[in-house]
C-alpha cells in the first residue's frame, strides 16, 4: 500500500490507537514518494521500517529480497530520518532486511553491520532488541544482546531517557 492509502485506512478505522508502519523500501517501490512523511504527526507512526533499495533491478522489478543495508542503495534515508525527527516521531526504527544473501551470514554480524550503517546517518538513537522468530544463531544473539531471539531495533530519541518499547512478533519471509 502507498503511504496515503495506509494513512486513510488508519483514519477510517476510527480507533484512537490506530497507527501506520511506513516502510522506506515500499514507499519507493509503491511510488508514494517521501515528502508525505512531513505531513504526518510523529505519534501517528507506530514503527518506521528502515532499509535501502539498490539501483537495479528496476523499481518495478524490486521485491523484498532486494532490500539492502541503509546507505548501500539509493533511497533518501537521511532526509527520511530528519523528517521523522521534525514531526516528533520518537518510536522505533526497525531495520527490515529480507535479503536471502544476509541470511547466509552470521546473524550477529548482520545485526552489527545494520546498526552501524543505520547510525551512520547521524540520528541519535537508543538501541533496543526486538523478538525475531527465525534466526540462525540464536545462542550468539542471546549472549550478545541479552534476549531470546532478536534483530537490532533503533528508536529515534530526542531525550536521554529510553523510548517505551512494546514487544511484537516479527516473522522472517
Image (tube, rainbow, N blue to C red):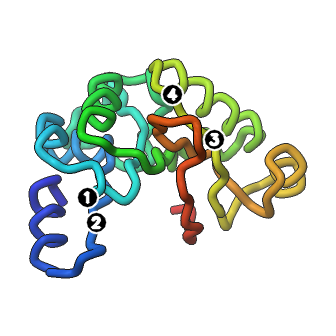
Residue under circle 1?
44
Q: Secondary structure at mark 2?
A: loop
> Mark 2 near mark 1, Cβ–Cβ under 8 Å?
yes
Left or right of 118 in this view: 67: left
Distance between mark 3 and mark 4 Cα atoms: 10 Å
Residue under circle 4?
124
Residue under circle 2?
19
Dot placed on the residue nearer the N-terminal end, 2 or 4: 2
The answer, for residue 96, to whether it is visible in the render is no
Q: Secondary structure at mark 4?
A: loop
Q: Position of residue 91 (x, y in %)?
A: 44, 50
Dot placed on the residue nearer the N-terminal end, 3 or 1: 1
Distance between mark 2 and mark 3 Cα atoms: 22 Å
> Mark 2 near mark 3, Cβ–Cβ under 8 Å?
no
Residue under circle 3?
127
Vertically, is 103 above or below 79? below
Amino acid at each position: 500500500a502507498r503511504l496515503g492509502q495506509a494513512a486513510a485506512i488508519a483514519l477510517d478505522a476510527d480507533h484512537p490507537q490506530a497507527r501506520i508502519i511506513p516502510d522506506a523500501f515500499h514507499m519507493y517501490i509503491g511510488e508514494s514518494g517521501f515528502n508525505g512523511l512531513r505531513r504526518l504527526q510523529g505519534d501517528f507512526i507506530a514503527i518506521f521500517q528502515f532499509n535501502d533499495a539498490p539501483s537495479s533491478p528496476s523499481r518495478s522489478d524490486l521485491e523484498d529480497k532486494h532490500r539492502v543495508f541503509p546507505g548501500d542503495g539509493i533511497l533518501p534515508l537521511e532526509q527520511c530520518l530528519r523528517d521523522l525527527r521534525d514531526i516528533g516521531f520518537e518510536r522505533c526504527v526497525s531495520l527490515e532486511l529480507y535479503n536471502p544473501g544476509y541470511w547466509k551470514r552470521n546473524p550477529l554480524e548482520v545485526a552489527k553491520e545494520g546498526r552501524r550503517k543505520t547510525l551512520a546517518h547521524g540520528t541519535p538513537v537508543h538501541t533496543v532488541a526486538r523478538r525475531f522468530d527465525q534466526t540462525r544463531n540464536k545462542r550468539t544473539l542471546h549472549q550478545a544482546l541479552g534476549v531470546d531471539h532478536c534483530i537490532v531495533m533503533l528508536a529515534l530519541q530526542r531525550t536521554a531517557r529510553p523510548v517505551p518499547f512494546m514487544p511484537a512478533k516479527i516473522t522472517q519471509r
